[in-house]
Structure formats: structure tokens, C-alpha cells
Image (cartoon, rainbow, N blue to C red):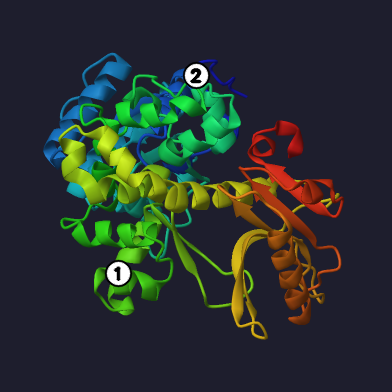
Amino acid sequence: MLSKPSRLFGREREWHALARFATRASRQPQLGVVSGRRRQGKTFLLQSLTEAAGGFYFGATQSTETESLRLFATALGDFLGEPVGRFTDWDTAVRFLYARLPARTHLVVIDEFSYLTDASPQLPSILQHAVDRAVFEETPLSILLCGSAMSVMGGILSGNAPLRGRANLELVIRPFDYREAAAFLGITEPITALKTHSVLGGTPAYRGFIAGDLPDGPDDFSDWVCRTVLDPTIPLCREARYLLEEETRVPDAALYHSILAAVAAGNHTAGGIAGYVGRRAHELARQLTVLEDCQLLSKEPDVFRRGRPRYRIVEPLMAFYNVVMRPQWALVESGRAELVWGNAGSRFHSQILGPHLETLCRDFALLRDHRGEPAGVVGSGVVADHNRRRQIEIDVAVFAPEEPGRPRRLLSIGEAKWGETMGGRQVARLTRARELLGDMGIDVTDCRLACYAAAGFEAAVEADPEIDTVSVADLYRAETV
């Protein structure tokens, strides 16, 4: 197995999958697809793999087919140490690849593959025939296709796509989770780590965007926001505006921006989003699907009520932009960061920090051991209390793995609060929700109540052995998972 370079932070699972793929390359022909949003370190990861395996790496650019073929031939010639001539089409280039490279290497990486298919939509079909031919002739050459256009890369192996059924590897490079992000940034104070993650998320490249300038504790966070993400001279300031166009690749992004703004403002249902942007719900189906495919938006089920999905912005920087920056963009561009931040403070706490804490608590609960049992499904949902004419929102619901023939078994339900001390009021609400869920036929015998809080807990709640209390420090403490 290829050893992971020391300069590569994290990515243990991803490296293991890629190293296995590269190790098998000398024994059999393979096809792999690696995708992920921009700025996640895919190119660095694949270049490290290529270097370790002695493979051939080609990074495509936005260009015409003729220029792409010329660049491809030049890269091949440099790798082989001899001119390879001129390729007139991709069929000729791919045939050359399979004929000549196995004598020198068994691994080929083609990065930004979607740039090539933009100019040459027939390329996947050409590769399909080449892969089938290699399998029949037992040609030991493996090709990794990588790209950042999620809607394009996601379609390479789906439906009736030419390469469907040919891949041995399908790997998505995701942002670092909240703990990995804190370690990568070198932030050890939990509140600072969570607040920073609510802005930057887990995208590795954003550390470079701000030249490594990070908040020096909770008291420095506001100043840090003003001197980085709200400073128009810092690349991160405009990143969210560019990100949407890069990921969706649509000519008119205005409607997409409005949809994301609707969700950021608290409209989480299709109907609520439609009402905010002034359209009918069915008219937004395509746009919502595109945003999901690009991993900018997620559609999450209500774990207690079927057919009631809720939408959530996945990329923290996009949520921050829509809540804090977009409503005051003229002020942002004029360099009045302190005024922008002062105007947006309350919105940041209610629309960013609160929902972000809930998301991290669900991530935490998914990996946590629940009194000796693993989590099966973790999500959120609403419990209707008809007698009291109210609805109880459950931020973190943990179900045990499903067992055929048995009712769904609930292990934990909890609330997550950023600015409130968790006490008897929240516990009473959770207790009532547990009763109602039992009446719905869900097995609540082993269901514990959980309070997740950034502002602490009342003494009685913290002392109660029947209630799980989880602080922000607990979220970042390795032994709690």
C-alpha cells in the first residue's frame, strides 16, 4: 500500500481508497471517478497519489477541443520523454494512451475532466469503448477522472451514461468535518472553533484565502470577521458570489441566489421558499435539484412526519453571505465592515450560529455511542401536540438501526440552543414530545433526553442522571465519541 505523504493533512479514508485503486492498477484495467466541490484539495490529493505511484497526471483547462488535445499531447510527451505527435481527435489520443502507457505506468489521472467534456461531449463514449476494450484485452491501465462540476461529475456514472457500470471507484472529496477543520486551522478553543466553522466551514483552501489569519480566541472573533470575510480586499469576501456560478454553471444565477437567500432567512420548505422568491413551488423543482446536486443545498426529511422535507444550506460561507453580507453588499464593497457586522449581529446569532450548532450536534450524535448502541438514523423533526395546540421542534433525534418486524426505536431526542441556558422548560418540552412519540407507535423505552447548549445548563438539569448534557467543549472532545 502506498504511504500517505506527511504534507497531506487528514484524508485518511480518501487516501486509503485511492491507494488501493493505484495498487490494483498493475493487475487489471480500472476506471475511477473522483469528484467534489472546488477548494477541497482534490488536485493536491491526486497529484500526491500520482507522484507516489509514478503515474501520469493531466490537468485540463477551459479550452477548445483542439487546444486540449495539443496540451494533452505535450503532457504525454513530457511524461514519456519523447514527442508523441499531434492528436486530431480524442479517439486517437485515448487509443495512444492505452497502447503506450502500460509500458511506463499503470495509473492515469485526468483532472478537471468536465472542462474536456464541455468542449468534447463525446469523450465519455470514447472512454467507454476504450475501457471495454482494455478489459477484453487485459490491458493493465487504470484511469481516474476527477472534476469539480458536481452536476457534471455526478452524471458520469448515472442513468444511461456511457460509463455507467464501468467504474471500480466513485469517491467524493468532502469538506473537513468540524473537528478536522479545527485541527487543520490549529484552533483549540471550542467556542472559537465553532464560530469560525460557522463562517469558513471545512474547506481547506479558505485558510489560504485569509493568509492564515485566524481569530485569537472568542474576544477576537468580531474583529476577525471584519478584517477577513467582510474586507473587500480579501478574496474570501467575494467567494460566495463566485461559488454559486462555479458550481451551478448556469447563465442566470439570480434565481439561485434568491433561493439560497430564502433558506438562509428561515424558509425551509418548498412552499416557503417559493413564497419568498415569488414563484410557485413546482416552478423551482429544477433549481432546487441543481443546488442539491452541487452540494450547496440539502433536502432533509422530517424523521417523524413523512413527506415533510426541509431544505438546509450545506456550505456555511454561503449561509453567512446570505444572512450577513448580501443584504448590505454596497456597504461591504465600500469597506464599512464594522457597520455591516454591527447591523447583522442579531441575525448572525439567530440565523447562523443557532442552526449551525444544531447541525454539528446531529453530526456529533451520529458518531456517538448511545449507552452501548450505535446510531442508525439521526435527524430532526416536528412533533404535533394537538391537545395543547402547539408543535415541538426536535433538533436532534437518534433512532437505533432498524430491525425487521419491530417498531422504530428511539434512543435520544434533544434540543440545541446557542444563546439560552438549558433548563426545566426545555426538559419539560422534551418529556412531552417523548410521550407523544410513544403514542405514535415509536418505541421510546430506551429514549433519553438530551440538552445541547453553548450557554450552559441549569444546575438541576446538569445533576440529573437521566438527562444527557452536551456542551460545545463536549462536541470537540474526542473521548465523547
Amino acid on which disc 1 is placed: Tyr
Residue 368, image x and y in percent? 73, 46
Drawn side of residue 85 relative to residue 446, left or right: left
Instruction: Look at the image and tell me whether residue 143 can be seen.
Output: no
Q: CB under 8 Å between callouts 2 and 1?
A: no
Point 36% across, 34% down: residue: 39
Drawn side of residue 476 relative to residue 480, left or right: left
Question: Element type at marker 1?
Answer: helix
Point 74% across, 59% down: residue: 424
Point 28% across, 33% down: residue: 338
Drawn side of residue 370 relative to residue 420, left or right: right
Residue 115, image x and y in percent? 24, 42
**Residue of label 2:** 52
Quadrant location, the C terminus: top right
Q: Which mark is residue 276?
A: 1
Q: Callout 2: 10 Å neighbours few (<14), some, many (20+)?
A: some
Image vertical order of residue 396 relative to residue 272, above or below: above
Q: Between tags 2 and 1, which lies in front?
A: 1
Image vertical order of residue 353 relative to residue 100, above or below: below
In this view, the residue in front, 69 or 181, is 181
- Give the alpha-carbon distance from disc 2 to disc 1, as whole Å: 51 Å
Residue 54, image x and y in percent? 45, 19
Of labels 2 and 1, earlier in sequence is 2
Amino acid on which disc 2 is placed: Ala
Image vertical order of residue 284 relative to residue 147, above or below: below
Point 38% across, 40% down: residue: 145
Question: Element type at marker 2?
Answer: helix
Q: Callout 1: 10 Å neighbours few (<14), some, many (20+)?
A: some
Q: Residue furthest bottom?
A: 387
